[in-house]
Amino acid sequence: MENVGALALLLAFCISLYAIVASVTGRLKRKPFLTLSAERAVLAVWLLVTTASGILIYGLLTSDYRLAYVASHTNRDMTLYFKFAAWWGGQEGSLLFWSWLLSTYAAVVVFTTRRGHRNLLPWVVAIVSTVQLFFLTLNTFVVSPFQVLAVDKVVTSVADGMGLNPLLQYWAMVIHPPFLYLGYVGFTIPFAFAMASLIEKAPGESWIHTTRRWTLVTWLFQSTGVALGSAWAYHVLGWGGYWMWDPVENASVLPWLAGTAFLHSVMMQEKKGMMKVWNMVLISATFFLCIYGTFLTRSGIISSVHAFAESPIGKFFVVFLAVGIAATIWLILDRLDYLKSEAELESVISRESSFLFNNLILLASCFAVLWGTLFPVITEKLTNEKISLDAVWFNRLMVPIGIFLLLLTGVGPLFAWRRTSVDSLRKNFQWPGIGTLIVAAALLLGGMRYPYSIISLSLCFFVAATISMEFFRGARAISEKTHIGFVPAIIELTHRNTRRYGGYLVHMGIVLMFIGYSGHPFNQTAIGEVDKGDSIQVGAYNLKVLDLTEGDTPNYEWETAILDVSKNGKPIGTLEPTRRFYKAAQQATAIVALRTGLNEDLYINYAARTGTKATIQAYVFPLVDWIWIGVLVLIMGTLVALVPSKVARSYARTEVVGVAKKKDAPVEA
Amino acid sequence: MPKYAKFAALIAIIIGSLVLVATASLKDSQTYYVTIPELHKMASATSTKRVRVGGDVQANSIVHVRPDLTRFNLVQDNLILPVEYVGRDPLPDTFKDGAQALAGGRLESNGVFRAEEIQAKCASKYAPKPGMAPDGLQKKMVPSAAGSSYTSKL
C-alpha cells in the first residue's frame, strides 16, 4: 500500500513537471493541444495526490503502525476524527495536505476557467504547477509520509503509537490548520493569475475580476483560521490569552495583513485604474508570505512553542523563496510600462487617500511584525547575539496601529472619491463625532483610566455609528421610493450592492473585535492552593471548593475540582475545572472551566495537585466574548460580499484603455 | 502647500512616529538568548539584563513550592542551572521532566535563575529522535524507505 502511495507521489511529481513544460511551450508555440494536455495533467496530479492522501489516511484510521508517520502521530485509543486530523498533525502529513489542497484548487481553476482566459490559463497552469512541483519535491524526496519502521531492513510495526499531542486534541485545533492552509494555499491562485496577466500583458483588470472571489474566499479561510487559533489558545492553554506574538502566530497573520491590504487596494484599480504596480507587489507579497509562513512553522529557524522539528526542508524553502521573489521582481520591473496609473491622487481628504493610508498602515504593521519576528535572526547575524523582542514591544507598536486602522475604517468609506466637500464632511461626521466625544467623556467620568481602552471604545462607537448611518440612509431612501418596510429595505439595499454592504458588515465585525480587545486591561487574576472547603475570591466571584475528585480512562487520567460559584454572594452554579494526563503522550493538559457572558468571562484553570491540595487559577476577562462575536460577524459579512449583487455592476472609469465595451457602461450607485 | 507635499508630510509623520515607537521600546523589551555555559561566564554582567536561557528539564527536579513558586533545574552539557519560576501564568502543559525549556528572566547574585516566563517544547512529540523507536521500544529502529530507494533517511 505505502509503495503505491509513494509511487503516486513520484508520478504526480513527474506529471507536474510535464504540465509546466507543456503549458509554456504550448502557449509560446501556439499549440492548443499541448496546453490542453497540460490542463489534463493538472487533473491527473489531483487524482494521484488524492490517492496518496487516501492511502495515508487509511493507514492512520486503521492504525497501521508499520508507517513511521502513523506511529508517531496517533495511538490506538484516540477517537476516529483525531486519527483523521493526524493527516495534518505532523510535518510529513501536513506537507502532503498542502499539496493536496493546491492540486484541488488547481483542478477547480482548470475546470471553472475552461471556457475563458485562453491566453492566461497556460501561464496560470504553469505557475501553479511550479508551486506544486516544489511541494511534491518535499513530499517525494525529502520528507516522505510513507516511510516504514524497520529493524535491519525488515519492516516492523510497533504495538502502539505515540499519540497526537493532547493539546491538539480539541475541536478548534482539528479545523484550525485546514482553514489556515486553505488560506495559505489559496493565494497561489490570484498570484498565478496576476503573474499570468503580467506575462501576457493582458489588457484591463480581468485578473482582478476573475480572482476576486478566490481572494475573498481565501481571505475568509485565513481570517477564520487565525481566529480559530486564537480561540484555541484562549480555551485550551489555561492562561486565558488569545494572542502572544509568537513567531508562528505572526507567520499566520503576516499574509493576512498583506491580503487585507490587497483586498482594499484592488478597489482603487477597479474604480480608478490606479495602484497597478502596488497591487502586483501586494499579491506577490501575500503569496510569498504564505510560503514563508509555512517555512517558518516547519524549519525551526526561530524557536517557538509551535515549531515542528528542525528539519532539512528549511534550505529548500529558502531557495524556492529566493528564486520566486527574484523572478517576480524582475517580471514586475520588466512590465512597468504596462502598469501605468490612469489617474492621480487629488486630495488628502478623499476615498483614494484613505485607501492609500489604509494600505500604508497595513503594510507598515506587516513589516513591523516581520521585523519583530526575524529580530533574533537579524541580530544573530549582525552581532552574534540572539536577541528576541517580547509581546510588550509588539503591543506598544501594534495597539496604536490598530487604533489608527479602526479610525480609517470609520472615516474612509464616508469620504467621496477624488475630493470631499466640507458640507459632506459635516453631514457625515457631525453626529457620530459628537456622539463619540460623549462616549469618551462618559467612560472617563465612569472611572476608566486606560487611555487606549477609552480611545478604542469611543472609536468603536464612532465606526459603528457611521456604518449604521450608511445602512439607515440607504434603506430609508429605498423604503420611501418603493413603499416597503424598513427591514426588507435593508435587505434590498444589501442585495443591490453586496460587496459594499458586506464590506460594512466585515468592518462591523472588526469593531466588535476591538470592543473585546479593549477589555484586556481590566483582567483580574487570583491564584490559590486549596483544599476541600477552602475558597478563592476573584473580582466579584467567590469560588468554594466542594470536592476534589479523580479518575481514569484508557486514554487519560483526570483530576477535577468541583467549585461552588457565587457572584456578589448570589449562587450561580458549580464549575468543574479538570486536568487530564494523557498516557500515550505522557503529557498533561487542562480542561478549563468557563462561565461566559457578554460582559465578562469567568475562567478557571486547574493548574496542579500537590498532596491533597489543588492549585487553582481563576481569572475574570471582561468583554472577551465580543472578539468571538466579532469574528462571526466578519465571516457573515464576507459571505454576504460573496453573494452576487442583484444589479450587475461595473465601475465607471475616467479613461480606460483596451477594456471590453460592456465594462465602460457607467453604472454607479 | 502642493498636493504631493501634503501626502509626503502625512506619510512621513506616520512612518516617523511608528519608527520612533518601535525603537524607543526596543531597549526594555529585548531579551538575549544565551546558553547555560554563556550565562555562567558572564555571571555578573547578566544580573541586570533580561535573558532567555534554554536547556533540558532535569528529571525529578521539579518542585512546586508554592502556587507562585516552582523550582527546577535546567541541564545542558552536564552544566546545571537552578531555576525559580515566579511568574503568574501557569506552567505550560508541555513542561515536564526531560522537556526542552526556555526560561526568561534574570540571574540572581546567588547563582539562581529567577524566571518570569517559561516556554517548553515536548521534545519527543514533534521530533522523534533519529533512529529511536516510539515510546517503550528499546530496540534501535531505523526507518527505512518504503521499498523504494528514492525516499531519504529520516
Image (tube, coloured by chain):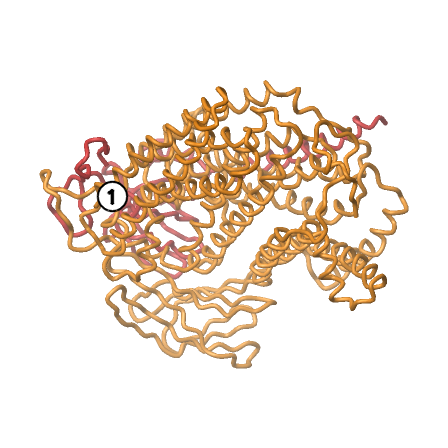
Image coords of residue A210 (percent x, y): 59, 39
Label 1 sits on a secondary structure element that is loop
Above or below, A102 against B97 in this view is above
Using the image as rendered, state which of residue A601 and residue A269 is in the foreground: A269
Q: Quadrant of residue A546?
A: bottom left
Chain letter of disc 1 in the image:
B
Mark 1 neighbour class, 10 Å CA radius: few under 14, some 14 to 19, many 20 or more: some
- At x 46%, y 35%, the residue is A292
Chain in red on the image = B
From what the image shows, is residue A176 above or below residue A372?
A: below
Q: Is residue B49 visible?
A: no
Q: Is residue A544 left or right of residue A608?
A: right
Q: Position of residue A395 (x, y in %)?
A: 57, 45
In the picture provided, is A263 more to the left or to the right than A553?
A: right
> Which residue bears the numbered disc 1?
B128
Q: Nearer the viewer, residue B1 or A341?
A: A341
| Residue A550 seen from this side | yes
Q: Amino acid at mark 1?
A: Pro
